[in-house]
Amino acid sequence: MMNYDLIVFDWDGTLMDSEVRIVACVQAAAADMGWPVPPAEEARDIIGLGLQEAVSALWPGMSPAQVNQLADRYRVHFLNDDLAPSALFDGVVQVLDELADREFFLAVATGKSRRGLVKEFERTNLESYFHASRCADETFSKPHPQMLLEILDQLGMEPARTLVVGDTEYDMEMAINAGADAIGVSCGVHTPERLMDNGALACLDNVSGLPGWLNLERQ
């Protein structure tokens, strides 16, 4: 039986269906810079990393100044354009309501910037559900555990009583690296097999299945 006090969600690909938007913004930024535009499959594979790490992974060998320039162009498109608008996955609000009613502590650990997450909080009105959040421009990017460890320290929680919910192997690895459990959702960018191979206890179709899974684990 597994009992958790804290549930930490990834944002993009887990709570928010933003894959098409992120890929479009990456490709638009590359075109602005005159860099090779990555195929959609390559661009989607870096979702979940911090922006600097994602740019470096897609275009290895670029100088720090070039990485910063591309990252700046991405931010311009993501924060200001209406390229492929993103939306919450079905059932997210209902799940958060149920978890809050059951008195779980909830948090967000995301590869987004703080500015980007604030914008999403304002657009979705979800901020009040979360007791803490960390972004990739505030600490180390996933899969480094620091983002999660800072949340645990802020809330006074133990890794052994923490569950990370995410759609990428980076989420799973971050959890394992911090001594926490992880569960995958297949509505995002990485396959169930990839999530399971990187430490997921299980893989759900989406977060709507999380309350039921928690019920089974408590029995």
Image (cartoon, rainbow, N blue to C red):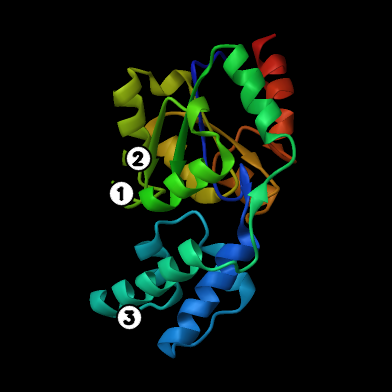
Question: From the viewer's perspective, is 87 left or right of 70?
Answer: right
Q: Is residue 58 above or below residue 173?
A: below
Q: Residues at badges 1 and 2 in contact (C-beta under 8 Å)?
A: yes
Q: Is residue 125 above or below residue 115?
A: above
**Residue at point 37% right, 76% down?**
70
Q: Mark on residue 20? A: none
Question: From the viewer's perspective, is 64 left or right of 162?
Answer: left
**Mark positioned earlier in the residue sequence (1 or 2):** 1
Residue type marked 1 = Phe
Q: Could you say which quadrant of the image residue 190 lies in?
A: bottom right
Q: Position of residue 95 (x, y in %)?
A: 67, 27
Q: Residues at badges 2 and 3 in contact (C-beta under 8 Å)?
A: no
Quadrant of the frame with the C terminus? top right
Secondary element under disc 1, as helix, strand or loop, is: loop
Q: Is residue 20 above or below residue 185?
A: below
Secondary element under disc 2, as helix, strand or loop, is: helix
Read off the residue under disc 3: 61
Secondary element under disc 3, as helix, strand or loop, is: loop
Q: Residues within 10 Å of mark 3 (few under 14, many from 20)?
A: few
Q: Residues within 10 Å of mark 1 (few under 14, many from 20)?
A: some
Q: Nearer the viewer, residue 161 or 26?
A: 26
Read off the residue under disc 2: 147
**Residue at point 24% right, 77% down?**
65
Q: Could you say which quadrant of the image residue 84 lies in?
A: bottom right
Q: Separation of disc 2 and disc 3 at Cα?
A: 26 Å
Q: Separation of disc 1 and disc 2 at Cα?
A: 6 Å
Q: Residues at badges 3 and 1 in contact (C-beta under 8 Å)?
A: no
Q: Separation of disc 3 and disc 1 at Cα?
A: 20 Å
Read off the residue under disc 1: 140
Q: Residues within 10 Å of mark 2 (few under 14, many from 20)?
A: many
Q: Position of residue 73 (x, y in %)?
A: 40, 74
Question: From the viewer's perspective, is 136 left or right of 88?
Answer: left
